[in-house]
């Protein structure tokens, strides 16, 4: 074998990570993976290992790093309880189309499926991983490893990105064989652009008087192309949680969901790119609406009924061709209606949610343009989806449709670890933050200067809100007892601050960003806030 050198499976996996651009692995060690960590030790000048205090954080950190960069990231856990602890993060990565590569240990190869009670044995681990991944495989021999690693990265880079998982039984790590140099994976070629379908889509959109665009996470790398089409059609563009920033929020054609809902009933055509659009198509209805869909995943195209025109492939290749095919003609006065709807609806939201709006404005004032906000399921977080301006893609990270409470702190740590000097701000409620509070130790140990704001209402605030408004105030399992968050942060060696007003919050965040040698935790006590749900749970308007 030309240029082959004898390497163990552990060494081959590490070389595969390096060949595919992985510079950081988020991982917890354990006996089933000891040879892998020894191989990481020997590559420590080329690859960084960040070990959190819980497997869930390994998964969330890799997820946050993947969402912030759009590139594959790697994590590793032991089998059984290690994998199950990380499963919520993998489910979120799957839902968010995040390229997270999971290296998961296994019991000895000869014992799999025999139910002998091996340490960390669970029945059907491979099946669990298959449900949480777009690609999964198991290494059984050293000669298989370069091909398996390449296949995993190729899957993450091709079509609709999803997590990939490689299982390695504990007795396979030390196997060796003469192996060729690891090749960097290349994506599969996308389907060719369907010229006839593009012409039909261009004709449909060009004839529309009130067209609308919808962009999701699959459109994050197509901002310039989508802006060109939006401006050519004078069409407003709605981006949901995963697509925030595909069009600068300050652009006059950018829409938030409540404004889009106001216009949805009178729109006559929609172009949806890289999005499930489940809220709009499944909730608001599509009766009488002409629909064009561009999707990398063919299964997604007909999820809510067959569109009028379907384009399966890479939006980055399709959109420029579609833009060139659009007919040039004067546009009807659609933008005036859009601007009026934006002014009325956003003005009403800002007035109704004035306390949240003031807090979010303070955050926006101090978070630089290239900074990243990691959102959470908290009252300020729900309002952020409505009110927080996002200037560019990958600067507003969300757990998307999975709605994973407690994900944010770990995800923000991962984002900050790979983004270097770029500011990252994590916001959380007191309930969600304590899911991963122990990772303050990780941030201090690995010198990750993340700034986190905990909005403290001593409750699972949204649960309490619904109990009060929908169940006659019958509160159960929603009140919380909390620590002094400032003293808690200081006990870990982090900087602890408290802010009780938006202006104090602005100063505290600025102080946190100026602290580069340790993390900062800011507690902001809040009382009951106005409910945002009248602007989120919006009724059907078509059909």
Image (cartoon, grey):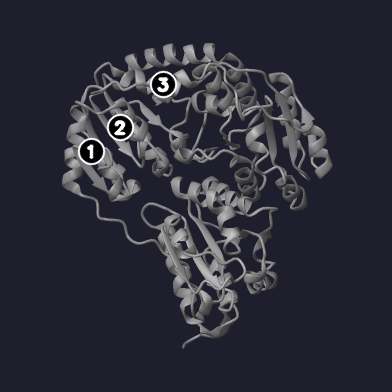
Q: In what element is the residue under mark 3? A: helix
Q: Is residue 382 visible?
A: yes
Q: Residue at label 3?
A: 258
Instruction: Between residue 343 and residue 351, name the one nearer to us.
Output: 351
Q: Is residue 393 above or below residue 111?
A: above
Q: What percent of the width, then of the height, locates residue 323?
A: 27, 38
Q: Residue at label 1?
A: 305
Q: Residue at label 2?
A: 281
Q: What percent of the width, then of the height, locates residue 24?
A: 62, 59
Q: Is residue 258 above or below residue 369?
A: above
Instruction: Point out the tag, 2 or 3, that comes first from the N-terminus.
Output: 3
Q: Determine the CA span between mark 2 and mark 3.
A: 14 Å
Please tell me how crowded label 2 is: few (under 14), some (14-19), or many (20+) other residues with Cα within 10 Å.
some
Indicate the quadrant where residue 311 lies. top left
Instruction: Point out the tag, 1 or 2, that comes first from the N-terminus.
Output: 2
Instruction: Between residue 125 and residue 198, name the one nearer to us.
Output: 125
């Amino acid at each position: 074998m030309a240029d082959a050198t004898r390497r163990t499976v552990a060494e081959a996996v590490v070389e595969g990570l390096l060949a595919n651009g992985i510079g950081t692995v988020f991982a917890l060690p354990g006996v089933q993976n000891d040879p892998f960590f020894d191989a990481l030790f020997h590559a420590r000048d080329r690859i960084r290992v960040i070990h959190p205090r819980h497997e869930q954080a390994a998964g969330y950190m890799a997820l946050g790093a993947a969402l912030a960069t759009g590139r594959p990231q790697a994590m590793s856990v032991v089998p059984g309880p290690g994998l199950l602890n990380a499963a919520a993060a993998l489910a979120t990565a799957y839902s968010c189309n995040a390229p997270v590569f999971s290296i998961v240990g296994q019991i000895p190869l000869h014992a799999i499926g025999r139910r002998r009670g091996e340490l960390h044995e669970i029945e059907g681990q491979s099946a669990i991983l298959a449900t949480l991944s777009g690609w999964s495989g198991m290494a059984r021999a050293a000669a298989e490893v370069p091909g398996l690693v390449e296949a995993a990265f190729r899957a993450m880079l091709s079509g609709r990105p999803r997590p990939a998982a490689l299982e390695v039984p504990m007795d396979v790590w030390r196997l060796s064989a003469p192996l060729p140099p690891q090749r960097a994976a290349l994506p599969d070629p996308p389907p060719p652009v369907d010229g006839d379908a593009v012409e039909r889509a261009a004709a449909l959109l060009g004839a529309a008087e009130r067209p609308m665009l919808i962009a999701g996470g699959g459109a994050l790398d197509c901002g310039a192309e989508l802006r060109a089409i939006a401006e050519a059609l004078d069409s407003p563009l709605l981006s949901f949680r995963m697509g925030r920033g595909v069009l600068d929020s300050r652009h006059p054609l950018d829409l938030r969901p409540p404004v889009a809902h106001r216009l949805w009933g009178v729109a006559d055509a929609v172009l949806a790119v890289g999005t499930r659009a489940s809220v709009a198509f499944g909730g608001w209805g599509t009766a009488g609406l002409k629909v064009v869909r561009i999707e990398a995943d063919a299964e997604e195209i007909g999820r809510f009924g067959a569109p009028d025109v379907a384009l399966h492939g890479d939006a980055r290749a399709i959109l420029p061709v579609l833009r060139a095919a659009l007919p040039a003609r004067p546009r009807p006065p659609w933008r005036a209606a859009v601007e009026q709807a934006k002014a009325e609806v956003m003005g009403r939201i800002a007035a109704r949610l004035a306390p949240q709006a003031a807090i979010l404005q303070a955050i926006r004032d101090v978070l630089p343009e290239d900074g990243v906000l990691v959102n959470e399921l908290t009252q300020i977080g729900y309002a952020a989806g409505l009110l927080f301006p996002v200037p560019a893609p990958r600067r507003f990270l969300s757990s998307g449709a999975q709605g994973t409470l407690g994900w944010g702190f770990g995800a923000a740590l991962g984002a900050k670890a790979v983004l270097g000097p770029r500011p990252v701000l994590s916001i959380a409620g007191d309930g969600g933050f304590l899911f991963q509070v122990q990772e303050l130790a990780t941030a201090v140990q690995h010198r990750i200067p993340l700034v986190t704001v905990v909005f403290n209402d001593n409750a699972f605030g949204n649960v309490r809100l619904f109990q009060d408004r929908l169940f006659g105030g019958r509160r159960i399992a929603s009140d919380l007892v909390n620590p002094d968050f400032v003293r808690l942060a200081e006990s870990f060696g982090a900087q602890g601050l408290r802010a009780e007003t938006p202006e104090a919050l602005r100063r505290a965040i600025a102080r946190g960003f100026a602290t580069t040698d340790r993390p900062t935790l800011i507690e902001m006590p809040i009382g009951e806030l106005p409910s945002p749900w009248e602007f989120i749970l919006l009724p059907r308007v078509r059909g």
